[in-house]
Structures are given as structure tokens and as C-alpha cells.
Image (cartoon, rainbow, N blue to C red):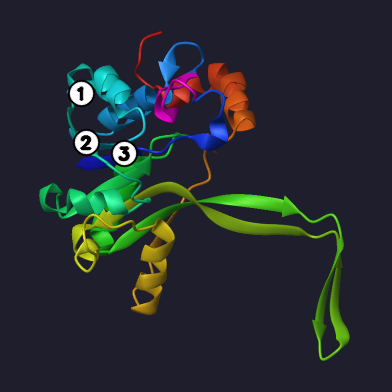
Amino acid sequence: MHAVILAGGKGVRLLPYTTTLPKPLVPIGDRYSILEIVLHQLARHGFRTATLAIGHLGHLIRAYVGDGDRWGMRIDYAVEESPLGTIGPLLTMRDRLPDDFLVMNGDVLTDLDFAGLLAEHNAARAALTIATYPRQVNIDFGVLKTEDGHVIEFAEKPMLDYRVSMGVYAVSRDVLARYEPGLPLGFDELIIDQLADGRPPREYRFDGYWLDIGRPDDYDRANAEFAGLRPALLEGVDT
């Protein structure tokens, strides 16, 4: 099993924490970086190889991770000379990827079963499988549905339930064949193209722990919760 970890972003939303460190290396719980936790998890789930897509302050990530030996993995790198979006980095390494592989953002804290996601993707012979997570939003207004100048439905301060992408997905290499390497390509574009082709992505539903560390309040929450979450996030790792 192979994983691609997207770690090339500038982490602008997480300033000032990312002024001198790339986002995947910011510390969680004063001991582990986000990336270190992710690599521990991948190794525990049976992943033996990984590629880190690096860009902004990538030399620090390379110096920190090295060849991956400390996690029992073999890790190589793909360098973004300019921003390529979420999927664009995969195109530059397409020829050295296996038929099916895991892709994940380098700033995600979760106890998702990464191997289970890839196994279900393989069993379904899917082109793209997206890990999804439930979210709820409280609307602070009375919501109207209108038609032909009339109100036909009303809900007072409803709660909306929906599912979001976790930033973790399984990809078939074949789905990348149509795109030109070196050009930016976003995850949203890939999904839209799959839907237009009549090949809707599969869903891998997950309801455990997930936190996308994109903003300072997310980072503060991760540190506040880490002591209680550590056994689940770092199962098998000595204190």
C-alpha cells in the first residue's frame, strides 16, 4: 500500500504558526508534529511506502522525515516548483504510482482506518473514493423557499446536515491519465469531471474523530484535545 501526503501548501490560514514552519510540522501536544502522527498511523495500518508532495519550506519537511526509516517506511519526495492544487502534484509522479493508492492532506488529525478505505476502494474497482464526515450547521434565520413570488415553505432556524470531504481519498491511477502534468488541478475539478463522465466517486463514510487543522482555532482545539485522543491517534506508540 502506498500513500501520497500533500504537504506543499503555505498554510496561510494558520498564521502566525506557519511563519517559520510548514503546516505539517507544527507541534501537537508539545511532542509530535501533525506529519509524525500521520506517518505513525500509516505505518501501523500497513503502508510501507509514501511520497511527500512538498513545496513551501519543503526542505524542513525533508530534513525532518528523511527516508522514513524511523517509521519502517520508504519515503520519497515530489517537489512543487509552483502551486499545483490538490491533484496537480499527483500528475508529476503519475508514472511511479501504483494502480491504486491513498491520498491525504498533511494537516489532518483522524483515527480513520486508512487501510480499510483503500481496501474498500480496491474491492469496488472504483476510480475515486472519498472519505466523508458528518457536519451540522445551525441557521440563525427563518429560512424561506419561494416560487413565483410566493413563499411555499418555511423553517424557523433549521439545522442543516451534510457530509464533507475529509481530505483523505483513494485514487486509481487511470483517473489521472487525461490530465497534463505540470498544470494545476484541483480536487473539485476532478470530482466535476468524474460526475460529467457518469462515474460518480464512491463514498467511504466515517463518523469517528476528524479535525482539519486549517485555522488557529482548529490548532488550539487539537492541542486541547490531544491528551485524551492520544491513545486513539497513536495506538501502539510508547509514551
90 left or right of 28 in image: left
Residue type at mark 1: give it.
Gly
Asked if labels 2 and 3 touch by Cβ distance under 8 angstroms, the answer is yes
Q: Quadrant of residue 113?
A: top left
Q: Residue under circle 3?
A: 5
Q: How far from the left and from the top, in percent, is residue 225? A: 59, 23
What residue sits right under mark 1 in the picture? Answer: 68
Q: Amino acid at mark 3?
A: Ile
| For marks 2 and 1 on the same chain, the one whose residue lies earlier in the sequence | 2
Q: Nearest the camera: 57 or 37?
A: 57
Q: Which residue is mark 2?
A: 50
Point out the image quarter for the C terminus: top left
Residue at 68% across / 51% down in the picture? 136
Which type of secondary structure does the marked residue at label 1 adopt?
loop
Dot 2 and dot 1 residues touching (CB under 8 Å): yes
What is the quadrant of residue 124 in the picture?
A: bottom left
Distance between the alpha carbons at the discs numbered 2 and 1: 9 Å
Residue 129 visible within the image: yes
Task: Using the numbered discs, state the Cα–Cα distance from disc 3 to disc 2 in whole angstroms.
Answer: 7 Å
Q: Which residues are magenta?
A: 19-27
Which badge, 3 or 1, comes first in the chain's sequence? 3
Q: Is residue 50 magenta?
A: no
The x, y position of residue 98, in whole percent, is 14, 50
Residue 200: percent from left, percent from top = 38, 71
Residue at far left of view: 95
Task: Say which element carries label 3.
Answer: strand
To which quarter of the image does residue 174 belong? bottom left
Q: Residues within 10 Å of mark 3 (few under 14, many from 20)?
A: many
